[in-house]
Image (cartoon, rainbow, N blue to C red):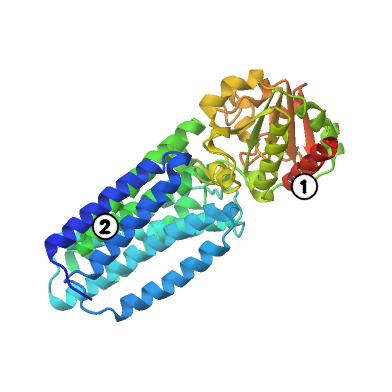
C-alpha cells in the first residue's frame, strides 16, 4: 500500500475529526441522525485508510486478517440484531473497546520494555489505559448480562460493598503506581485483575431502572479508554475521538440523571430498581386491587371518534416488538381524522433514545414523536392516552407522593387525558419496583395481554369497523 507523509496523515485525521464532530451534532435529533451516522462512517473510513498508509505500519498480514474477521462478525450481527436488543448490543460493543484498550496497553508495554523505551509518562499512560479499559470491559459484560436477562436485573447489594469498592480502587491505584515505578509484571497482572473485579463490583449492584444511565456511562468509559490508547500509541485522532465519546457519554449520563431527578453518585452507588420481564397474570388479580380492566373494543370505542390520541411507548413495547403494529394503529386512526402523537420519556427503555430508535425502525414520522417537556401540556386536551408497556415514566406518584422512591422524577402526565388505557401483561410494577398509582385513577382502564397481540387486535378492530 502507498505510504503517505506525516503531514498528509495529519490533514486526513483533521478531516476525520471534523466529520466526527458533525456526526455528533447530527445524532442530536432523529431527523438528522441518519446523516450523522453517514458522516461518522465517512470519518472512520478516512481515519482507517490514513492510518494504514502511515509510515508506522510495516506489515499488513495480521491487520487485514483482523479487519476481515471483524468485518464479517460485524456484518452478521448488524444483519441479525433486533432493534429491541440494541441496548445489550451497545453494552457488548463497549466491552470490546475496553478489552482492546487493555490488550493494546499490555502489548505496548511488552514491546517497549524489550526495546528499552519505557519512561515514566508512558508507564502512567499504560496504567490508565489498562485500568479504564478493564473496568469498562467487565462493567459492560455485566450490563450486557442484565439487559439480555442472563443475569438478574435486580440490584445485588450486600453489606460493605461500598467499602469493598473503595479498597479495590485504592489497591488498583497502588499497584498501578508500583507498576509505573518498577515495570513489574506482577504488579501489572494484579492491577489488571483488580480493575476487572472493580468493574464487576461497580455495576452488579445497579438495578434495571438505572440501565439507561449505565449504558451512557459505560459509553463514556469506553471513550476514555480509547483516549488512553491514543496516548499510548501517540495517535492524535484516537485521542480526539476518545475525548469526544468520553465527554458526550458523560454529558448524556447527566441528562439521564436529570430526567430521573437523581445524581450520578446515587445511580452508581444506590442500587435502585428491580427487573425482569413481566409475567402473565389474570385480570381478576387487578379487580381484587380495585383496578378496572377493559377489552380492546372499549379502547377502540373511544379512540376511533377521538380528536387526539397520545401513545406512550415503554420497554414492554420493545419486549413485545409492537412498534410496527403501533404504526398501523396510528395510520388507521389518522385515516379517521384522529391526531396521533407518541410521547417519549428520556429514560423509557433500556438505553438513551431507545423508544426513538424503535419508532424510527417502524417508519413512524419524526413529527409524530414528541419529547416529554413538549407533550406534557397536551395531555389535558387529549381524548385518550394509550400506555404501551410503560410503567414508572407515567406514575403520578413521582409528582404527588413525597414518600415514593421515584418522587421528584419528571414523568409524562398521561393521567390528565380524558381516558387512559394501559396495555400490560400483569399487575407487576415497573423496573423501580414501585406500584403505579395511574392504574387506580377513575379515568384509567387496563387491557391485559401482550402489547403486540393487543395492538394488532386494535388494528383489526378498526379495520373491521371501517367496512
The residue closer to the viewer here, 175 or 1, is 1
Q: Is residue 340 left or right of residue 367?
A: right
Query: Could you tell me residue 104's position as x and y percent?
Result: 29, 68
345 over 143 or under it: above or below: above
The residue where tag 1 is placed is 453
The residue sitting at 63% across, 38% down in the picture is: 313
The residue mark sitting in front, 2 or 1, is 1
The tag earlier along the polypeptide, 2 or 1, is 2
The residue closer to the viewer here, 196 or 298, is 298
Q: Is residue 186 left or right of residue 30?
A: left
* Cα distance between the residues tagged 2 and 1: 47 Å
69 over 248 or under it: above or below: below
* Mark 1 secondary-structure assignment: helix
Tell me, for residue 238, which label it has, or none: 2
What is the quadrant of the C terminus in the image?
Answer: top right
What is the quadrant of the N terminus in the image?
Answer: bottom left
Q: Residues within 10 Å of mark 1 (few under 14, many from 20)?
A: some
Labelled pair 2, 1 in contact (Cβ < 8 Å): no
The answer to whether residue 168 of the structure is visible from this angle is yes
Query: Could you tell me residue 231's position as x and y percent?
Result: 21, 58
Query: Could you tell me residue 269's position as x and y percent?
Result: 46, 42
The residue sitting at 61% across, 54% down in the picture is: 152
Amino acid at each position: 500500500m502507498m505510504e503517505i507523509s506525516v503531514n498528509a496523515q495529519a490533514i486526513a485525521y483533521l478531516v476525520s475529526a471534523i466529520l466526527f464532530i458533525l456526526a455528533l451534532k447530527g445524532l442530536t435529533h432523529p431527523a438528522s441522525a441518519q446523516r450523522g451516522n453517514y458522516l461518522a462512517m465517512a470519518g472512520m473510513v478516512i481515519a482507517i485508510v490514513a492510518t494504514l498508509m502511515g509510515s508506522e505500519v510495516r506489515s499488513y498480514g495480521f491487520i487485514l486478517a483482523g479487519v476481515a474477521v471483524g468485518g464479517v462478525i460485524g456484518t452478521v450481527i448488524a444483519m441479525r440484531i433486533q432493534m429491541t436488543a440494541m441496548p445489550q448490543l451497545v453494552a457488548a460493543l463497549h466491552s470490546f473497546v475496553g478489552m482492546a484498550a487493555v490488550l493494546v496497553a499490555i502489548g505496548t508495554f511488552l514491546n517497549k520494555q524489550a526495546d528499552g523505551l519505557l519512561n515514566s509518562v508512558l508507564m502512567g499512560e499504560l496504567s490508565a489505559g489498562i485500568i479504564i479499559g478493564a473496568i469498562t470491559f467487565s462493567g459492560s459484560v455485566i450490563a450486557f448480562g442484565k439487559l439480555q436477562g442472563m443475569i438478574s436485573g435486580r440490584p445485588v447489594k450486600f453489606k460493605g460493598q461500598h467499602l469493598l469498592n473503595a479498597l479495590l480502587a485504592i489497591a488498583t491505584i497502588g499497584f498501578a503506581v508500583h507498576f509505573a515505578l518498577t515495570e513489574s509484571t506482577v504488579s501489572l497482572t494484579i492491577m489488571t485483575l483488580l480493575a476487572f473485579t472493580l468493574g464487576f463490583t461497580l455495576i452488579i449492584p445497579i438495578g434495571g431502572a438505572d440501565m439507561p444511565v449505565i449504558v451512557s456511562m459505560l459509553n463514556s468509559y469506553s471513550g476514555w479508554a480509547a483516549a488512553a490508547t491514543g496516548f499510548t500509541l501517540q495517535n492524535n485522532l484516537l485521542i480526539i475521538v476518545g475525548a469526544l465519546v468520553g465527554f458526550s457519554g458523560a454529558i448524556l449520563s447527566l441528562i439521564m440523571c436529570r430526567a430521573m431527578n437523581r445524581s450520578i453518585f446515587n445511580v452508581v452507588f444506590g442500587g435502585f430498581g428491580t427487573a425482569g420481564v413481566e409475567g402473565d397474570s389474570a385480570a381478576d388479580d387487578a379487580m381484587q386491587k380495585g383496578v378496572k380492566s377493559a377489552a380492546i373494543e372499549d379502547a377502540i370505542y373511544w379512540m376511533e371518534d377521538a380528536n387526539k390520541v397520545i401513545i406512550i411507548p415503554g420497554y414492554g413495547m420493545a419486549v413485545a416488538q409492537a412498534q410496527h403494529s403501533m404504526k398501523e394503529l396510528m395510520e388507521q386512526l389518522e385515516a379517521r381524522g384522529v391526531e396521533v402523537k407518541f410521547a417519549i420519556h428520556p429514560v423509557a427503555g433500556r438505553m438513551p433514545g431507545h423508544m426513538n430508535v424503535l419508532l424510527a425502525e417502524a417508519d413512524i414520522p419524526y413529527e409524530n414523536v414528541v419529547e416529554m417537556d413538549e407533550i406534557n401540556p397536551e395531555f389535558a386536551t387529549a381524548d385518550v392516552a394509550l400506555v404501551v408497556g410503560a410503567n414508572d415514566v407515567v406514575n403520578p406518584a413521582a409528582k404527588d407522593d413525597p414518600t415514593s422512591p421515584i418522587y421528584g422524577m419528571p414523568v409524562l402526565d398521561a393521567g390528565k387525558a380524558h381516558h387512559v388505557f394501559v396495555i400490560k401483561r400483569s399487575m407487576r410494577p415497573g423496573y423501580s419496583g414501585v406500584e403505579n398509582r395511574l392504574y387506580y385513577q377513575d379515568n384509567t382502564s387496563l387491557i391485559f395481554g401482550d402489547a403486540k397481540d393487543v395492538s394488532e387486535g386494535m388494528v383489526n378492530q378498526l379495520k373491521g369497523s371501517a367496512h
